[in-house]
Image (cartoon, rainbow, N blue to C red):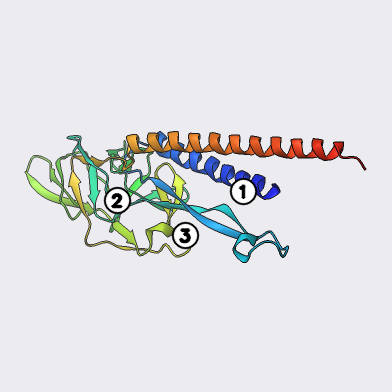
Amino acid sequence: MENALLIGLSRQMVLERQLDVVANNVANVNTNGFKADQQLFEEYLSSGAHEDNFPGAARKVAYVQDRGTYRDFSQGSMQRTGNALDVAVTGDGFLTVQTAAGERYTRDGNLHMNNLGQLVTAAGDLVLGTGGPIVFQPTDHDINISPDGTVTVVEGVNRTDSIRGKLRLVNFADPQQAQKQGNNLYAAVGGAIPQQDIKSTVQQGYIEKSNVSAVGEMSKMVEVMRAYTQVANMLQVQSDLRKNAIEKLADVPA
């Protein structure tokens, strides 16, 4: 009976964690470039019964264990914005940005120009090119960003094409090792070593939307809540059985 209670509690703990993951996905359904998190489960076997009247297979107690989460890096849908500075990354690449904490990486291509003429993210972080920050001149116009990330402009009134830089795209041999840092940024930690990406391309005037399926995540949330309620009911039944057993044992004459 104790095993049933412990197994039920282990399941509830995992369901609570799963609900947090699903809720975070739902909250970021409209976040540009967001990649959905998914949960991994595994069975944890514990030897619980040792009496001779228990068969070998019945001696093991199976618990539910939350092994961790992984990110779904599948491509999100493309949305046209018409903004010449917006870019959507197609492929496994990430844009490189400079933050106060160091270099970080993002799929959010909603870019802007600050009052210094620098190309920045919506949060104000500098977007890095292969030669450093990308800076525009006051007379620049007709900005063009080619699929390989090269940023060109028409300078002044002479209709002269000038290169302002090339977006620095990187990828990771194992993107699961990249660590989420908040503000839609990833950090290279542990085995996540950024390397130049020559296969990914960018689309000017588009942004990549979140790859979260709102309908799928809401359905999953309902399933998790129902499963939690079912486990809670089972635990209540087990608790009642234990209470009744104790009461009846107390009535047995000594």
Which element carries disc 2, helix, strand or loop? loop
Residue toward you, 150 or 61: 61
Give the foreground label among 1 and 3: 1
* Residue designated by label 3: 189
Residue count near mark 1 (Cα–Cα under 10 Å), binned few <14, some 14–19, many ≥20: some
Q: Position of residue 147 (x, y in %)?
A: 16, 52
Residue at numbered disc 2: 74
The residue most toward the left is: 159
Direction right: furthest residue:
254
Q: Amino acid at mark 1?
A: Ile
Callout in the foreground (2, 3): 2
In the structure shown, which secondary structural element does the residue marked by tag 3 occupy?
loop
Q: Please indicate whether residue 180 sits to the left or right of residue 58 in the image.
A: left
Amino acid carrying label 2: it is: Ser
Q: Which mark is residue 47?
A: none
> Which residue occupies the foreground of this view, 85 or 106?
106
| 156 shown above or below 71 | above
* Residue of label 1: 7
Q: CA distance from mark 1 to mark 3?
A: 35 Å
Question: Earlier along the polypeptide chain: callout 2 or callout 3?
Answer: 2
Q: Earlier in the sequence, mark 1 or mark 2?
A: 1
- Mark 3 surroundings: few (<14), some (14-19) or many (≥20) residues within 10 A: few
> Residue 192, percent across and down?
42, 62
Q: Where does the image place residue 104, in percent across and percent down from the top left? A: 40, 52
Q: Is residue 30 visible?
A: no
Q: Is residue 217 left or right of residue 56?
A: left
Asked whether residue 218 appears in the rendered view, the answer is: yes
Disc tally is: 3
Q: Residue at x 57, y 39 (%)?
A: 231
Q: Quarter holding the C terminus? A: top right
